[in-house]
Image (cartoon, rainbow, N blue to C red):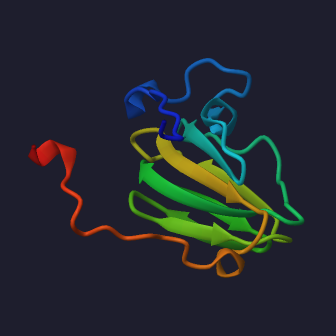
Amino acid sequence: MSDYTAIELGGLDEWGSGGEHPGKRFIDAELGTAHTGISVNSTEPGGESPFWHVHSAIEETHIVLSGRGEIALDDEVVPLGPGTVVRVGPGTWRAVRALPDSGEPMKWLCVRSGADSLAGVGDDAEIDSERPFPWNA
């Protein structure tokens, strides 16, 4: 039996409704991930993080899907828009906001990882270029 978990997040317009943390849904527990944390996020225009935060051992990658905003990284501010991807290393304080004139909520993924480095894990991919895809059957 294959080892996977599939969940439905709904469309981007459904992100941010309800939940323990308004505008944020941590899906790593739902997926049962062991080494990767993932949250889906929605911030209304003019909205911002409720606080700064820093990780001592976790790296975050923010992937912006829609809307416009900014991420504060220590004393620097990086503009965010659809297609912007920002890696934030351990020890860097961070906070996010959606610009008041964004025109739509800012929607983004935050991927958190720790454990061993990818270099430490190495390239563990096995390739099978002969196996047919099931959608070509």
Front one among 6 and 51: 6
- Which of 131/99 is in front? 131
Q: Quadrant of the C terminus?
A: top left
Do we see residue 68 in this rendering? no
The x, y position of residue 76, in whole percent, is 71, 75
Q: Is residue 98 left or right of residue 21?
A: left
Task: Judge by depth and name the residue closer to the eye, 20 or 103.
Answer: 20
Residue positioned 71% across, 54% down in the render: 35
Q: Is residue 118 above or below residue 58?
A: below
Q: Residue 67 location in percent, x, y?
A: 43, 48
Q: Residue furthest right?
A: 56
Left or right: residue 51 versus residue 69 is: right
Question: Would you say residue 92 is visible in this rendering?
Answer: yes
Q: In the drawing, does residue 97 fall left or right of residue 100?
A: right
Image height of 61 relative to 50, above or below: below
At horizontal 85% and vertical 66% (from top left) the residue drawn is: 57
In the figure, residue 86 lies in which quadrant?
A: bottom right
Q: Residue furthest left?
A: 137
Coordinates of residue 55 in the picture (x, y in percent)? 85, 61
Please tell me in which quadrant of the rendered image residue 118 appears. bottom right
Count of numbered marks: 0
- Locate residue 78, reporting x and y percent: 59, 70
Q: Picture quarter containing residue 93?
A: bottom right
Q: Residue at x 40, y 34 (%)?
A: 12
